[in-house]
Amino acid sequence: MIKKIALLGSTGSIGTQTLQVIKDNKNLYKVQSLVAFSNVEILSHQAKEFGAEYFATISNDGIECLEKAVDGVDLVVVATRGMVALKAVLKALEQGKTVALANKETLVCGGEIVKEYLNKYTGKIYTVDSEHSAIWQCLEGNKKSQVKRLVLTASGGAFRNFSIEQLKTAKAQDALKHPTWDMGSKITIDSATMMNKGLEIIEASYLFDIPQEKIDVVIHPQSIVHSMVEYEDGSVMAQMSNPDMRLPIQYALSYPDRITSNVSQLDLIGKKLEFYAPDYNKFKCMKLCRKAFEMGGLYPAVLNAANDVCVEEYLKDKISFFDIPDVIEKVLQSYQIKEQMTVDGLFAIDRKVKEYTKKLINGEITIV
Ligand code: MG
C-alpha cells in the first residue's frame, strides 16, 4: 500500500532530500501535503511535481497550516525549524500516525509532553537524525534493559582542530565550511560549538528512554560510524554508511523494511576510522545541555531559546565563539521560569527567553 506523506519543512535540506527519496520510490510513497516556511516559488514547484493535494507556507497561512497538513496522511515528516511543528506532531500522535522526526527542538523542549502523548495514544516517533537512526538500528533485535550505554558519534564540527586561542577569534563564516554533512547555517554553527551533540544527548534520552548518564559522545571525524550501542556483555553494535541523510530519512519511511537506495556504497578498504574524546573545555555547550536536562522541566527549552539567539548573533559577528556558552550559562542561571510545561507555556518561554537573551547580549540586563 502506498504511504501518504505530509512533509513539513519541504524546502530545507532534509525536506528536499526527503523528496528525493520519495521520487526514487514512487511505488511506495505519495506526497499528500507540503508545508514550507516562506519559499512559495520552490514550494509550488514541488507541489506541482509531486502532485500534492495541499500545500501552504507558514509565513502566509500561519502555523495552523502545519496541523491541516497532517489530515488524511499516514506518515508526517517533520523537517521544520524550532518548535513550530509541535502542535502538528502532537495531533499526528493523537491520530495514531507515524512521525518521522528530523527536528530536535520538538523533543529537547517538548519531550515531556511528547512522551505523554506516546504513552496515551498509538502514534509513533521514528527518528530521522543520523545518530539516532543508527542507535535505533543497533537496538533492533536486542533488549533495551541490557544496554550498557549509547555512544553518539560527532564529526567534531568545523572547529575540531582549533586551539583555544584560535577559537577566541573564530568567525561563523569559518564554520560554514563544514567538513562532512551538508546542513543549514544554524545546525552548522551548532555543530561547530557541539551544541548540536548536546541537544542530541537529550533527544536520545527521550527517544530511547535511556538516562543521560548512559549516553556518551565520541568524536569521529569521518562520519562513517553514525553511532553505537554497547551492551552488558561488552558487545558494541555500530551502524555505518557513507554520510548521506537520505539513508536515515528512508529508514524512517520504510521501517521495518529496508529498501534499495541511491546512497553510494561504503567501501572500507583503505579507509581510516578515527575516534577521539571530546574536549569539554573548548566545547562547553555539551555540558550545558547535560546541566539543563538535569535541571529538568522547562530548562532545556530555556537553553534552546538562548542558543537560538546566540547563534543568530554569532552569524552576524555580534558575539564571539566563547560568548555562546557564556551567555547560555548566564541565562540558565538567572532566568526565572514562571511558565508551565504546556504547549503554550513552551511557546511563551521560547519568546521570553529570546528577548531576555537579546537584552543580556546588548547589556540591557546585567547579572551579578
Ligand atoms: Mg545528528
Image: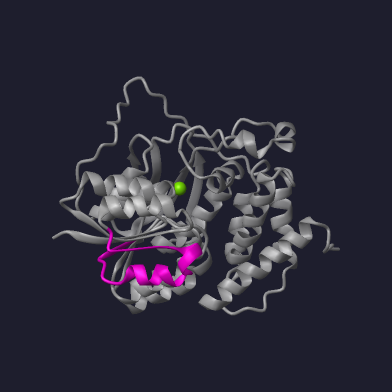
For the view shown, which residue lies furthest in the left direction? 1
> How many numbered markers are drawn?
0
Residue 273 x/y as whole percent: 42, 29
Q: Residue sitting at 44 percent across and 31 percent down?
A: 222
Relative height, residue 221 to residue 97 (above, below): above
Q: Judge from the rendering whether residue 314 lies leftward or rightward of residue 15; answer left or right.
A: right
Q: Judge from the rendering whether residue 326 lies leftward or rightward of residue 40; answer left or right.
A: right
| Foreground pick, 266 / 20 | 20
Q: Residue sitting at 22 percent across and 44 percent down?
A: 24
Q: Judge from the rendering whether residue 327 lies leftward or rightward of residue 266; answer left or right.
A: right
| Foreground pick, 283 / 97 | 97
Q: Is residue 72 magenta?
A: yes
Per the rendered image, the range of residues in magenta is 52-76
Q: Judge from the rendering whether residue 99 lies leftward or rightward of residue 36; answer left or right.
A: left
Q: Quadrant of the N terminus?
A: bottom left
Coloured how?
A: one colour
Q: Is residue 231 magenta?
A: no
Q: Which quadrant of the figure has residue 193?
A: top right
| Foreground pick, 294 / 242 | 242
Is residue 297 visible in this depiction of the protein?
no
Q: Residue sitting at 59 percent across and 80 percent down?
A: 340
Residue 121 x/y as whole percent: 32, 77
Is residue 218 visible in this depiction of the protein?
yes
Q: Residue sitting at 65 percent across and 39 percent down?
A: 172
Relative height, residue 149 to residue 278 (above, below): below
Q: Quadrant of the C terminus?
A: bottom right
Residue 78 x/y as whole percent: 39, 59
Residue 155 x/y as whole percent: 50, 37
Q: Which quadrant of the figure has residue 298?
A: bottom right
